[in-house]
Amino acid sequence: MTHDPDSMVAVETLGADPVPRARRVMTAGTVFVVWALASASATTPIIGLLLKGMSVGRFAILVGVATLCGLWPGMMMSEMGRDRPVISMVTAKRTFGSAGAAALTALYALVGAAWFGLNTAVGAEIVGALVPKWAGGALIVLGVAQTVLVLFGMPLLEKFYRYTGPIFVLCYGVLAYYLFSRYPFSWPIQRAPVDWGRDIDLVLSFSLLAWAYDFPTVTRFCVPRDATEPVLTRWRFRLSAPLGVMSAVLVMGILGLLSLHLAGLWNVALLAKSLPLWGEVSAVGVILAIAHTNAMNLYPAVTKVMMLVDAARVRRSAVQQPFTVIALGAFSTYLAYAGILHAVQSFLSILGAFLFPFTFILVLDYVLSSAPQASGDQDGGRPGAESGARTGMALVVLLLGLGLGEWSPPFTGSVARFVPWQMVVAVSAALLYGAIRRYLMGESTARGTPGVVGDE
């Protein structure tokens, strides 16, 4: 990231406002690092537990197929932030209307809080493995520390990722060394047929499509897209966030599978209770991974709440965003106490049912918009909300997709093993919406060159 020499790290008060051009300096490489570290949570190896019994080779294939399935919406969400320097839920007003976007914004703010609580609970579990009496206090300490980090917003978060990334890699390297040196090594053997369809949905709801709708929260700080920029540059920005997320899932998932197979623990950091000092220090260092991830859970959740504050026509003050950070951080930490870690699989299933159709419909609407930021289509520098039949139809199709996503596939046997049902439903919902927009409402699907807002 190239920094403005006059910029200073301070408590952020930007809220859901468009990012001014002077602050739009983030590079594609920085985006990759931010999302790779955000995805490489101490919780990420739990995918090894959820996919227990899968071989490493088939897991790698699974992640590759899941990446291909979710790549298009991930790339378009990344580009959306460069075209429109606002969070995706502001853009969603055009697709789902003001009321629909507000309801979804509130829901996804809660989702971010739930992820924050989930990861904080894992951090406390690591501390509890080393010093059992500290587990409860660790929840509070971790919650407070991560909340303070988010108070300073993206300028500090970018520096935090950049400078703590090597420490994170070193700590996991030490733990992996102890894992492979203290336990007889063998590769996990595939003992049952792979349910490819179900597992693709699971991986996507755990990774790419769980993060994609928040990509614009980061890429709105990127260098604005220019019609004259090289094709390679454009593709680097498109791919940096989705590939950052999925590369971390691949590496951390394999580590989780191996740790579960060799030591009986999906969380390799829990091995520290029987390791020498360097192992214990590395386990504590892994908590950096939790802070990496939770920053990208809490920060986007805060921007969503600030969008709701704006929608309520509440007069903006300098203390609103800091107060929101503190309040949401406290609530998220409470979720860790409430035991959200024990409901992780159900949480992921519900999350996928909501996010899959939402993401695909929003992205298709963005792609089909002939002039996404045409003159007169802004509200204070933000995308204005559409009204009438189109937004109502988008909500109907979204709810239809939600219902079908939670419904068991209407087929059995070998076919079901290869059909990622939630993905099929999401793509079908988006295509239905596109067909309604094109053929029933007579709207053009020719995409023009998106403009840029927030550059005043």
Image (cartoon, rainbow, N blue to C red):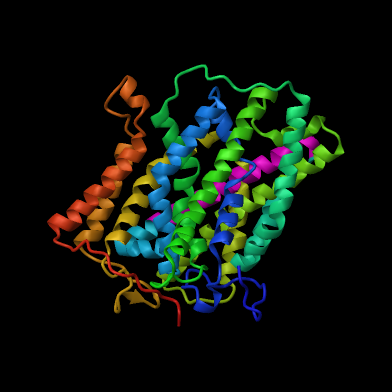
Horizontally, is 452 left or right of 183 in the view? left
Residue 114 lies in magenta, yes or no?
Answer: yes
**Residue name at image x 67 percent, y 59 percent:** 162
- Residue at 36%, 76% (x, y): give it: 379
In the rendered image, the vertical position of residue 113 relative to residue 373, given as above or below:
above
Question: Looking at this view, is 159 or 355 the one in front?
Answer: 159
Query: Magenta region's main secondary structure?
Result: helix
- Find the residue positioned furthest to the right: 277
Would residue 442 appear left or right of 207 to someone viewing this image? left
Q: Residue at x 54, y 78 (%)?
A: 22
Q: Is residue 342 above or below residue 413?
A: below
Q: Nearer the viewer, residue 265 or 328?
A: 265
Camera-side residue of 385 and 37: 37
- Residue 366 sits above or below residue 39 on the image: below
Q: Which quadrant of the figure has residue 82?
A: bottom left
Q: Position of residue 222 (x, y in %)?
A: 51, 67
- Magenta residues, start to end: 104-133
